[in-house]
Amino acid sequence: MRIQLSNKKILVTGGAGFIGSNLCEEFLQRENSVVCLDNFATGKRENIEKLQANPNFKLIEGDIRNIDDCSKAVQGVDYVLHQAALGSVPRSIKDPITSNEVNVTGFLNMLVASRDEGVKRFVYAASSSTYGDSETLPKVEDKIGKPLSPYAITKYVNELYADVFSKTYGLETIGLRYFNVFGRKQDPNGAYAAVIPKFVGQFMKGESPVINGDGNYSRDFTYIDNVIQANLLALTVQDNKAVNTVYNVAYGERNTLNDLVSCLKKYLSEFDNSIEKIEVKHGPNRMGDIPHSLASIDKAKELLNYNPVFSLEEGLKEAVNWYWENL
């Protein structure tokens, strides 16, 4: 897909994180100037290590909870890609105050700083967790339920604030509701590691991963390159109808955790055939988890011309190859 975007100054908050660092890399390759704002609470220096030699890349170590850091980061910026957040439903249940400070106060700080600097467009990471207890499948943007975790509340509040800022101050905003993003640079370690890198890391060590529940919960797993495409489109779309709204960013298919494990074992066994024999354990369902998630991507297809290329299987092949070379 040919999307023209070059010679712009783009701020990526959380730019040393999994998604943020991939976005930084993409926009540098497209000959833009990129500013990365990160406090390294969850971001990794190694994610941006290779970028720092690029004269068009600038790292600002700062915290979105500090309005002065936000104001410094947006100076002279054309576009903001706001990826900084404290992710993880379990983390937010354990510590709702910090999740709120980062995800709500930090988000508001970035909106204010962007408004004051005259940023052209503010594209932000929203979340499929916003659908909450809605049992409707597939998930359609204008039909949500009640949030099931503090994290989900914070991400919904982001959407409400963005809507108010677009209507009140004329700041162009687009929210991208990510569905279970995975791929290169996603951290396999730590208490709140996402399921795919965590399971890959355990299989590679010969350990048995633990599935929460019976493995029949399903997710719309979304490879990082699909997410990069959505961000590019959100920054460049010209149609007024496409701005100041939210979109599902997913592949549009759902797979169970059992499906996921089967695929992982298949692709990892190409490197080490003993992995095929590793048995998976099952634990209790996790508090705050929704049973099933499947996105309708019709709105993004229609208004953004979004066309995700990587299915779960195709994305997993790429991800497994990356992890095998880098872990």
Image (cartoon, helix red, strand yellow):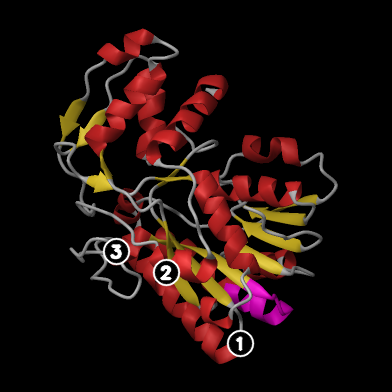
Q: What residue type is labelled 1?
A: Gly
Measure how far apart labels 1 and 3 are at the Cα level. 28 Å
From this view, report whether residue 152 is shown above or below residue 14. below
Q: Where is residue 42 in the image (x, y as percent from the top left)?
A: 52, 45
Q: Which of 243 and 38 is in front in this view?
A: 243
Vertical side of 280 occupied by 102: above or below: below
> What kind of element bears circle 1?
loop
Q: Mark 2 points at which residue?
A: 299
Q: Which of 282 and 30 is in front in this view?
A: 30
Mark on residue 275?
none
* Residue 274 falls within the magenta-colored stretch: no
Picture coordinates of residue 23, whole percent (x, y): 62, 50
Q: In which quarter of the image is residue 22?
A: top right
Residue plotted at (37% across, 50% down): 88
Q: Which residue is at a point 25% across and 37% down the rendered structure image?
A: 257
- The secondary structure type at the circle numbered 2 is helix
Q: Name the residue under label 3.
A: 139
Q: Which mark identifies residue 170?
A: 1
Please say if the residues under marks 2 and 3 sit with CB atoms less than 8 Å apart. no
Q: Is residue 266 left or right of residue 54?
A: left
Going by the numbered disc 3, the residue's amino acid type is Lys
209 on left or right of 230 = left
The span shown in magenta is: 111-121
